Amino acid sequence: MKRLISIVLLISTGLLTGLNAQTYRHISGWSQEINDQIEGFLNTTITMDVRKVAVFDSDGTTFGQVPHYLADEALYRYADNVLKERKDREAKEKLKILDRMVKDGNNVGKAYVEDRVHFLAGLSPEMIETIGYECYRESYQNKTYPEMKQLVANLKEYGFEVYILTASPEFLYQKFVSEEYGIPVTNVVGAKCVVKEGVTTGEIIPPIPQDDGKAHTIETFIKARPLIVGGNSRGDMDMLNESVGLKIVVNPDDVTVRGPEDGPMAGHTVKSYWEKEGALIVRCNDVRDPKVRYHTGEWKIRENRANPK
């Protein structure tokens, strides 16, 4: 009987060990070398007794941004499909905001980013969520990077909390991003605004996850130093430097040499800077779908550079 009990205990222990084992699954589309580096790092985190947090930028990092940012497409699409048919005061005021945004032209600038929130003010969170979700389903559903979805699946296997940050209005992105990546809507953090009696306002709650605001957002809302951070552009530099472990840069620009205003990146392209810093450089396919109508281009907003893999 004692021998039988010992055998049962050994089998039970083995089963529990197997259930708790963290298994890395190869990310198809990335090289063996990249997979080995990611797996090696994840294995070093197994015994860590801390919050294991990974933070990623949104557009251009977790899904495509070519030829236009989804946030812009959602707004200009809504204007063309809904507002232009209306003659009421609210519609006219919203179209004026878009005209101001078009005149500004800098769709990564502070004023432009804030005007996205002002444009949506007065709508319910649910309505904004629907605007973003319908735009995603119609024009961006095939632009989610499969490699990044596999990476996030691995991170969950290793017990990571995964957050995705965007400078775009939070309600616009939360539904589709949380569905695609299987993370809570509260882990999709964007430009926040005050909601009063079920209606959004133009009152912005700082920090906005843009440029150094992304790093401040991690400190303010996530409240943990991430072990992994992923981004794609100059605007992600401060956030990437919050990582105490692995830095992953997706499709970094290797054409534009940054100027003195870009601090330590001055004299480098985004790609050459992060290569120097030892970040992991990965590629994901991001090209224009010729079958999709992009309203943003019809409003004369600049296109993002393609990244064919």
Image (spheres, rainbow, N blue to C red):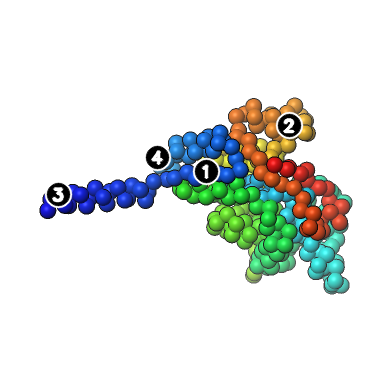
The amino acid sitting under disc 1 is: His
Cα–Cα span, label 1 and label 4 = 21 Å
In the rendered image of this protein, does residue 291 appear above or below residue 81? above
Return the residue at label 1: 26
Q: Residues within 10 Å of mark 4 (few under 14, many from 20)?
A: few
The amino acid sitting under disc 3 is: Arg
The amino acid sitting under disc 4 is: Thr
Cα–Cα span, label 4 and label 3 = 33 Å
The amino acid sitting under disc 2 is: Thr
Report the residue at 60% width, 40% height from top: 30
Residue 261, how many percent across, how many down?
76, 33
Identify the mark nearer the N-term, 4 or 2. Answer: 4
Residue 197, how many percent across, how many down?
64, 70
Return the residue at label 3: 3
Circle on res. 47: 4
Which of pointers 3 and 2 indicates the residue nearer the eye? 3
